[in-house]
């Protein structure tokens, strides 16, 4: 069937529908069973919680009844005149003998374990005292009324006391104690539920058991043969806090027991209920629900399969015919669809599908013919486009210009061969990288990126600029760039066409011409024209900010003899050495220039009083120390220096230059290798 749907495993829609419906039904039934199970468990827990409340109420009631009985017995005992008189006279021996007789009777008839008599001061007068009785004695004596309490230490007691009256005054108190275990036995007799009594203190009684996991001592237990194993098992599974908060079960010998903890005066009473019948009944109900649900699921699935079988079979036959359309076998496909559409009684969706398939076959047959015709036309057009593409590609790779196409995010997508050769980066390396990554980082880089973005957004129609291109070999080329937008109506995207030409030679020539226009080629210093421009600037600055400066003329002594004796080459070397020396000995704010021949000029700016003398001496010393190579050791250098400071009378630089020139000649007249400062107060000297 269509080569099993292009290599994938074939799975009939009939079985897909059947499987999916089965999964849905199974999920619904599983959810229903879970709901029933959770509901049953919840009902069980509610029922057990209700029984727990009843048990708690019963136990509290039994304790109250025991307390009332003890108080009644205590009241009856205080009516014994012989005992009262002995207490009033504090006859301890008589009181003790009377209590011995009374305690035996109470123990046999009423299960009272201890009887004690206290004076009005709370001092034990006779009988056996239990721990914890002092607080109850104080309460009875202070209230002068019968009182009861439950006290737990190593054992638990229900205690009751009554005041002893003599001649209308309270002369003491009579206390009776009954073990709480007696109450637990009555509770077990009434409710048929076992209990265990836990206290906080460890008991030294060998019949008591300490439970480490609960940090409690088990001091009383009904039905110990079975209950002890149940409590030990529960202590390994649950904490007392968990037993007090909810239903918890323990499985012992195929029987299930529920354990609940009841708080009692700092101790705990563990209630043990046999819930085996309830649990087994609940499990049986759940099993029956599962069996009924499984049977219902099987019946529903069989009915569903019967309903789906026939229409799905016809649908499969239709699917088997459809591949004929893909094979352009339209005639056989229409005949097969027509045979499949013959129904005797009713028609359904499969008949509509077959009728539609017949119409589709006719339409596809017509479209196939049109498609073949269109393919022939497209093949011809494709051949023409390939020729045009080859022509454009050759044109782009032939032109000596960098051509790059950027996407709408400014990333490079295409470049020509000239761009690859010039930059040294391959097309793969440049593709996807930001255009500005090709440019040398400068203060203009960010501005170029913004302008290209404006071209992409349509804010600028084009953008031209010059920028340095950094090649793979770290060579820097000066390129003139022009960026224009490329817009595709079909794809609705904007791209940028970036074209650049290498103007490095032109820029270098312009830079050399600019340098030659301002510098002397031999010495590398500023020439006379630039020196005069700097003088004009210094003059303007002096007038505006009232700053002082001085012009310096330097003329080499006997330079003509050096040329005549050693040659012009040595003369040129001496000129270079002088230029280098003047640059080193001048300050960063000073200007040094060669005015021509053996004449040099300097502009000294912002100097302090007396500083000109230091500067002039330093220059004379530096120039006198010039020495050429060993073979020309006979060549010596000295210079005459004239200095003129700018004064208020000087209107232009010509006056200043004339004064400096006059001072220089004055230095020569004084014996050369010297300097002279022009003095405006004595111009006749110069």
Image (spheres, grey):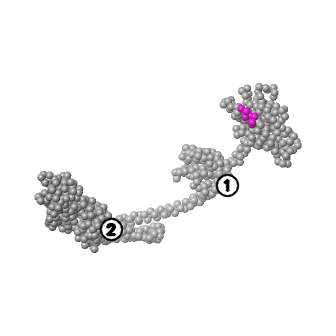
The residue indicated by pointer 1 is 473
Is residue 638 found left or right of 435 in the rendered image?
right
Determine which of the numbered discs, if any, sits on residue 60 in the image: none
| 2 or 1: tag closer to the N-terminus | 2
Taking the spot 74% from the left edge, 34% from the top edge, the residue there is: 612
Q: Image check: 285 left or right of 315?
A: left
Q: Which residue is at the front of the view, 79 or 45?
A: 79
The residue located at (63%, 56%) in the rendering is 425
User: What residue lies at 18% left-to-right and 64% top-to-bottom?
Assistant: 112
Q: Taking 527 as reference, is 252 above or below it?
A: below
Residue 220, image quadrant: bottom left
Q: Residue furthest bottom?
A: 253
Comparing labels 2 and 1, the label whose residue is closer to the camera: 2
Start and end of the magenta stretch?
A: 609-615
Q: Is residue 613 magenta?
A: yes
x%, y% of residue 116?
19, 60
Q: Residues within 10 Å of mark 1 (few under 14, many from 20)?
A: few
Quadrant, the N terminus: bottom left
Give the residue number, with chain letter if any, for mark 2: 236
Front in this rendered view, residue 568 or 435: 568
Element marked by disc 2: helix
Q: Is residue 203 left or right of residue 94?
A: right
- Helix or strand or loop: what does disc 1 sit on? loop
The part of the image, by quadrant, that contains residue 217 is bottom left
Nearer-the-camera pick, 664 or 129: 129
Please state the total of marks drawn on the protein image.
Answer: 2
Number of other residues with Cα within 10 Å of mark 2, as a class: few under 14, some 14 to 19, many 20 or more: few
- Name the one closer to the observer, 440 or 277: 277
Q: Position of residue 149 (x, y in %)?
A: 21, 58
- The x, y position of residue 326, in whole percent, is 47, 67
Query: In the figure, residue 137 lies in which quadrant?
Result: bottom left
């Amino acid at each position: 069937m269509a080569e099993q749907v292009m290599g994938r495993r074939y799975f009939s829609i009939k079985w897909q529908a059947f499987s999916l419906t089965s999964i849905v039904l199974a999920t619904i039934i599983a959810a229903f069973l879970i709901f029933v199970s959770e509901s049953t468990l919840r009902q069980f827990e509610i029922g057990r919680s209700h029984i727990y409340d009843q048990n708690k109420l019963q136990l509290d009631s039994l304790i109250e009844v025991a307390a009332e009985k003890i108080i009644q017995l205590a009241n009856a005992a205080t009516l014994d005149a012989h005992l009262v008189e002995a207490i009033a006279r504090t006859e301890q021996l008589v009181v003790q003998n009377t209590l011995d007789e009374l305690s035996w009777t109470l123990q046999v008839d009423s299960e009272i374990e201890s009887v004690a008599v206290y004076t009005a001061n709370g001092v034990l007068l006779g009988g056996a005292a239990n721990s914890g009785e002092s607080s109850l004695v104080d309460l009875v004596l202070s209230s002068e009324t019968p009182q009861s309490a439950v006290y737990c230490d190593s054992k638990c007691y229900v205690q009751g006391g009554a005041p002893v009256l003599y001649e209308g005054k309270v002369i003491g108190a009579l206390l009776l104690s009954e073990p709480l275990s007696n109450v637990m036995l009555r509770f077990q007799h009434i409710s048929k539920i076992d209990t265990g009594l836990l206290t906080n203190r460890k008991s030294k009684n060998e019949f008591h058991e300490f439970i480490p996991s609960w940090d409690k001592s088990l001091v009383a237990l009904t039905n110990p043969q079975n209950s002890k194993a149940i409590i030990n098992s529960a202590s390994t599974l649950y904490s007392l806090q968990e037993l007090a908060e909810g239903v918890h079960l323990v499985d012992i010998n195929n029987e299930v027991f529920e354990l609940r903890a009841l708080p009692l005066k700092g101790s705990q009473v563990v209630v043990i209920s046999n819930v085996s019948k309830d649990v087994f009944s609940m499990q049986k109900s759940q099993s029956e629900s599962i069996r009924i649900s499984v049977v219902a699921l099987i019946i529903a699935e069989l009915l569903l399969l019967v309903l789906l079988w026939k229409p799905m079979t016809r649908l499969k036959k239709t699917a088997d015919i459809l591949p004929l359309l893909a094979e352009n076998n339209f005639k056989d496909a229409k005949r097969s669809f027509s045979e499949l559409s013959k129904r005797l009684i009713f028609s359904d969706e499969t008949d509509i599908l077959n009728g539609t398939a017949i119409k589709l076959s006719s339409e596809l047959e017509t479209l196939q013919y049109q498609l073949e015709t269109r393919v022939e036309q497209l093949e011809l057009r494709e051949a023409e486009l390939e020729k045009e593409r080859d022509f454009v590609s050759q044109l782009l790779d032939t032109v000596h210009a960098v051509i790059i196409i950027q996407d709408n995010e400014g990333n490079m997508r295409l470049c020509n061969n000239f761009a690859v050769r010039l930059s040294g980066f391959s097309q793969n390396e440049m593709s996807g990288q930001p255009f500005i990554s090709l440019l040398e980082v400068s203060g203009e880089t960010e501005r170029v990126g913004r302008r290209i973005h404006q071209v992409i957004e349509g804010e600028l129609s084009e953008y031209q600029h010059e920028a340095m291109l950094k090649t793979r070999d770290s060579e820097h080329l000066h390129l003139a760039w022009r960026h224009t937008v490329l817009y595709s109506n079909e794809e609705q995207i904007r791209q940028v066409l970036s074209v650049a030409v290498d103007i490095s030679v032109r820029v270098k020539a312009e830079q050399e011409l600019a340098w030659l226009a301002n510098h002397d080629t031999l010495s590398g210093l500023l020439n006379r024209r630039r020196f005069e421009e700097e003088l004009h600037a210094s003059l303007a600055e002096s007038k505006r900010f009232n700053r002082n400066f001085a012009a310096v003329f330097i003329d080499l002594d006997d330079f003509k003899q050096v040329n005549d004796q050693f040659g012009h080459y040595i003369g040129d070397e001496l000129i270079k050495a002088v230029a280098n020396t003047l640059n080193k000995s001048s300050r960063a704010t000073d200007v040094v220039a060669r005015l021509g021949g053996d004449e040099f000029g300097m502009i000294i700016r912002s100097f302090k009083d007396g500083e000109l003398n230091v500067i002039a001496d330093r220059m004379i010393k530096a120039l006198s120390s010039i020495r050429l190579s060993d073979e020309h050791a006979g060549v010596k250098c000295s210079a005459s220096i004239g200095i003129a400071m700018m004064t208020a009378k000087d209107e232009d630089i010509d006056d200043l230059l004339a004064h400096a020139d006059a001072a220089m000649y004055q230095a020569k007249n004084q014996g050369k290798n010297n300097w002279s400062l022009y003095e405006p107060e004595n111009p006749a000297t110069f």
